[in-house]
Image (cartoon, rainbow, N blue to C red):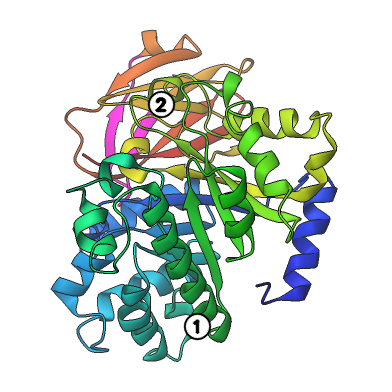
């Protein structure tokens, strides 16, 4: 299943060196059909991803993209090709993944799209199968999976039938990914040990969810399932942990914690795991679900500084909390739009404090820059995104 031995060795080396430089920092992009073809929305997504250091985008809604643009038509699907190319060549995105729930779509849409484009910067790099075989509401009688996939395939409408269908789909997806020299991966929630052993041998990497409300439990929530994969005959197994920014999970936590902390906490616990099974896991990095829930709750922006430390930003709805570094005497804080136009200067009583909030309800969607000038002529700047 490993299609690039040199890359595999590199990833093992990274894992064994305690992930000093993480390999994958991914983002699930939901609502992609509403982003594609809209220059401002595309720019907002790509600037957001670059500003926060994401290097992998997994795209949802491709069936809707196909319905609107026809992925088999090289002329009408140009917006998708342009988006992927810009992501890779201008915004430091290393790989773009296609997310779908069945082999047919990969074979008849994603592969056709890829084969019609000779430029690798315009192609998908990853085939991502998302089929929740463990979900009783969808695999059970009258459930979506039951009526759409299981009954037509002559399978029982339960989790056992769901897993049989999923396993066959994943095997075929991995086969064509191998032919195409691409990566195959799958999202997994709650497999048992036997299922985990089989899944590990059917694709290149596993995305394992850790859907919790705080980083304090993010590792313990997955440790048993990690041990299942570690015991697979194909171990060591490449794992990417998924965190959720939904309001029922880490959404509230993200309003006061940097998103990087979730994986830092997870990695520390993984490294301190006393069980010997940890040698069966290559922890490649992490992925966030999903974009629409993150753009107003994560600390945003990467700071560029001269002579002082960086600004910290926390954004929630129409309020942005700004925390400035200690030291230095501020003379001015100004906000500019992406065209360099001055939008707002903050009053003197605000800039006397190193922690304050601004209201952005009057700002239009786009990228903005906060510029802070100090009495000694040093300056510091950072950017933030408004997208409603």
Secondary structure mostly seen in the magenta stretch: strand
Q: Which residue is mark 2?
A: 249
In primary-sequence order, the first of circles 2 and 1 is 1
Q: Nearer the viewer, residue 316 or 139?
A: 139
Q: Which residue is mark 1?
A: 120
What is the quadrant of the N terminus in the image?
A: bottom right
Image location (x, y in percent) of residue 145: 26, 55
| Helix, strand or loop for disc 2 | loop
355 relative to 26, above or below: above
In this rendering, the answer to whether 153 lies above or below 43 is below
Q: Which mark is residue 264?
A: none
User: Given this view, does label 2 or label 1 mark the residue nearer the observer?
Assistant: 2
Which residue occupies the foreground of this view, 13 or 196?
A: 196
Mark 2 touches mark 1? (CB < 8 Å): no
Residue 337 in view, yes or no: yes
Residue 318 x, y percent position in the rendering: 25, 25
Residue range in magenta is: 333-347
Query: Which quadrant of the figure has residue 66?
Result: bottom left
Q: Is residue 385 above or below residue 269?
A: below
Total residue callouts: 2
Q: Residue placed at 29% from the left, 69% from the top?
A: 153
């Amino acid at each position: 299943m490993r299609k690039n031995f040199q890359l595999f060795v590199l990833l093992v080396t990274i894992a064994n060196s305690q992930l000093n430089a993480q390999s994958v920092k991914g983002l699930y992009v939901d609502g992609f059909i509403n982003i594609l073809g809209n220059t401002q929305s595309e720019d907002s997504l790509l600037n957001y991803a670059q500003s926060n250091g994401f290097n992998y985008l997994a795209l949802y809604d491709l069936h809707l993209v196909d319905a609107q643009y026809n992925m088999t038509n090289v002329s009408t699907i140009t917006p998708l090709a342009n988006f992927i190319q810009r992501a890779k060549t201008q915004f430091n995105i290393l790989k773009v993944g296609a997310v779908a729930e069945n082999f047919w779509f990969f074979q008849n849409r994603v592969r056709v799209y890829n084969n019609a484009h000779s430029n690798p910067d315009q192609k998908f790099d990853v085939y991502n199968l998302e089929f929740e075989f463990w979900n009783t509401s969808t695999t059970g009688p009258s459930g979506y999976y039951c009526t759409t996939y299981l009954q037509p395939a002559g399978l029982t409408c339960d989790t056992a039938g769901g897993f049989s269908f999923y396993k066959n789909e994943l095997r075929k997806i991995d086969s064509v990914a191998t032919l195409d020299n691409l990566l195959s991966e799958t999202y997994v929630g709650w497999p048992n040990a036997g299922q985990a052993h089989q899944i590990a041998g059917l694709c290149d990497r596993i995305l394992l969810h850790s859907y919790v409300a705080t980083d304090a439990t993010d590792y313990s929530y997955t440790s048993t399932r990690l041990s299942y994969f570690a015991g697979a005959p194909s171990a060591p197994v490449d794992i990417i942990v998924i965190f959720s920014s939904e309001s029922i999970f880490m959404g509230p936590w993200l309003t006061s914690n940097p998103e990087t902390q979730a994986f830092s906490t997870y990695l520390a616990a993984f490294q301190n795991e006393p069980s010997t099974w940890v040698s069966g896991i290559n922890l490649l990095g992490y992925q966030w679900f999903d974009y629409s829930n993150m753009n107003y709750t994560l600390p945003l922006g990467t700071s560029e500084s001269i002579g002082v430390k960086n600004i910290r930003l926390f954004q929630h709805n129409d309020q942005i909390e700004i925390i400035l570094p200690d030291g230095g005497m501020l003379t001015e804080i100004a906000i500019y739009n992406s065209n360099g136009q001055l939008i707002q200067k903050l009053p003197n009583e605000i800039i006397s404090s190193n922690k304050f909030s601004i209201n952005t309800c009057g700002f239009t969607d786009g990228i903005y820059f906060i510029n802070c000038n100090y009495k000694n002529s040093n300056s510091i700047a950072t950017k933030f995104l408004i997208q409603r």
